[in-house]
Image (cartoon, helix red, strand yellow):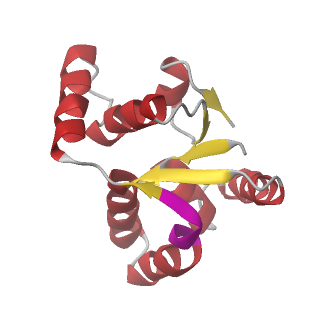
Amino acid sequence: MRRVFVDTSAVYALLVASDNNHAPAAEAFRRLILDQSQLVASSDVLVESSALLGLRVGLPAVATFRTELAPVLEVIWIDAELHERGLDVLLTRGNRALSLVDAVSFLVMRQQRIEDVFTYDEHFADEGFVVL
């Protein structure tokens, strides 16, 4: 079974109809479901997505995320060690535009041997992952 990491940018595009990437995100998500891909996200992505949706769109969007999208995700829970390793990646990259959540996501993807990512964030392609 193909495993695909889901990034916050894809969650946001999928759930927010006014987002510029909404239509392609909806189509990509439909294909992933039809292909029976296993969708994977980290607990950090859940937190970041909830915060972004709540801030920009409102709590109803967070509720939709919780009830309709989050249940289809396999969640990798981030522990203190992985968090610290993510901080190391963030600091060694020296890229102010890179987020800690992205740095941890890179580690999770490598740890889980996931090459494909559902994202609209260019940092994943820069790291050598296959952006859908």
From the viewer's perspective, tell me whether residue 87 is left or right of residue 3. left
Q: Position of residue 23 (x, y in %)?
A: 74, 57
Specify whether residue 71 is painted magenta.
yes
Q: How many numbered badges does the structure rendering display? A: 0
- Residue that appears at 56% across and 24% down: 125
Helix, strand or loop for the magenta stretch, by majority: helix
- Residue that appears at 42% across and 76% down: 62
Residue 48 location, quadrant: bottom left
From the viewer's perspective, tell me whether residue 87 is left or right of residue 106. left
**Vertical position of residue 12 compared to residue 130: above or below:** below
- Residue that appears at 67% across and 58% down: 22
Q: Position of residue 75 (x, y in %)?
A: 44, 57
- Is residue 32 or residue 113 the one in the foreground? 113
- Is residue 36 or residue 16 the one in the foreground? 36
- Is residue 42 or residue 20 the one in the foreground? 42
Residue 86 location, quadrant: top left
- Residue 20 visible (yes or no): no
**Vertical position of residue 91 compared to residue 54: above or below:** above
- Residue that appears at 69% across and 37% down: 132
From the viewer's perspective, tell me whether residue 78 is left or right of residue 119. left
Which quadrant would the N terminus be assigned to in this image?
top right
Specify whether residue 28 is painted magenta.
no
Q: Position of residue 94 (x, y in %)?
A: 23, 16
From the viewer's perspective, tell me whether residue 106 is left or right of residue 67. left
- Residue 44 visible (yes or no): yes
**Vertical position of residue 50 compared to residue 21: above or below:** below
- Range drawn in magenta: 69-74
